[in-house]
Image (cartoon, rainbow, N blue to C red):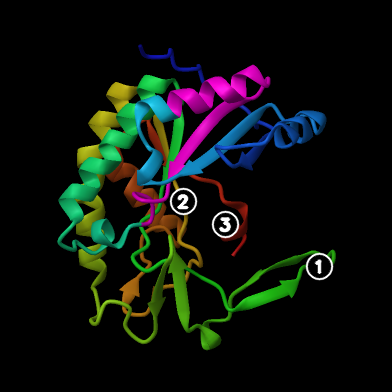
Amino acid sequence: MSHPLDKIEPGIKVTAQMSPEPSEQDLEFVRALGVTHAVLWTDATKSSYEYYASRRELFEKAGISVYGFGNSSVHNVDAITLNLPERDAKVEEYKEHIRNLGKAGIPYTTYAHMGNGIWSTGREKTPRGAMGRAFDLSKAEVGHWHGREFRMPLSHDRVFSEEEIWENFAHFIKQVVPVAEEAGVMIGIHPDDPPVPELAGVPRCIFGNFEGYRQAMEMADSPNVGLCLCVGCWLE
C-alpha cells in the first residue's frame, strides 16, 4: 500500500530536524514550539518503504508532517562524486531511496556532491554569543562524513580535476531525474560545506558558487531538482 504524496505548498515551513525514533517528550516539545513539519535522517540500515511509511504515520499521529527524509548512506558519497568502484551501486541505492520516499508519501530529500566530507576547524562564538562551527582553510586537516575521516593533503591519494567532478555529477543527475519525476519527490542539492575551491585534492567547483549551481540546474533541467538553502553555507 502506498501513501499519497502531500502537495508542497509554497512558503517557509516551521520545521525541526528530528530523530526518526523520537520519544513522546520529543514530540511534545516540538508541538509546544508550534512546529508543524519535521525533517528526518536515516542510513541504509533503515531505508525501506515500510520504514519510511511507519515514520510518516508515527509523526502524523502526533500532528507533525514529515516534509523530508535524508539518507546519509547515499548523500555526500565519494563513490558517486569521484567515480569510485561502488558508484553504480550507490546511484541505484539513491534511486531506490527516492522510489521508497515517493511510495511512502514523503515529498523531499537532499543530495550533496562533496567527495570528502564536511570540514570544520573548531567552534567559535557567533556575533550574538552562540557557539558555532568554524572553518579556517589554513588550519584544515580532516573532514568527516558518516563515520569516515578524510585527511589532508590528498584524501583519495590523488588530485581530481573539475572536469571529473562535473562528469560524475552529470552521470548521477541524468539517472536520478526521471526517477524523481516519476516518484513525485523533490531533491534539494546541498551546498558544499565549506564552499571553498578545493579540499584535499577534490575540487568543490559546482555547489560552492552561484555559477556552478546555475549550470547544474540547467543540466538537471527538472522541476524536481533545486537548491537546498542551508543558510550557513550560503552565508559563507
Give the x, y percent position of residue 155: 33, 78
Horizontally, is 65 left or right of 50 in the view?
right
Indicate which disc, 1 or 3, sits on the residue closer to the N terminus: 1
- Residue 13 is situated, as x and y percent measured from the top left of the image, at 65, 31
Q: Which residue is mark 3?
A: 234
Secondary element under disc 2, as helix, strand or loop, is loop
Which span is picked out in magenta?
52-76
Q: CA distance from mark 3 to mark 2?
A: 10 Å
Who is closer to the viewer here, 86 or 184?
86
Residue 127: numbered disc: 1
Q: Is residue 191 visible in this depiction of the protein?
A: yes
Instruction: Give whichever of discs 3 and 2 has the lower sequence position.
Output: 2
Q: Who's the residue at 24% across and 82% down the image? A: 157
Mark 1 nearby-residue class (10 Å; few <14, some 14–19, many ≥20): few
User: Marks 1/3: CA distance?
Assistant: 17 Å
Left or right: residue 39 versus residue 212 is right
Of residue 218 and residue 226, the one placed in the foreground of this image is 226
Q: Residue at x 84, y 64 (%)?
A: 128
Residue named by callout 2: 190
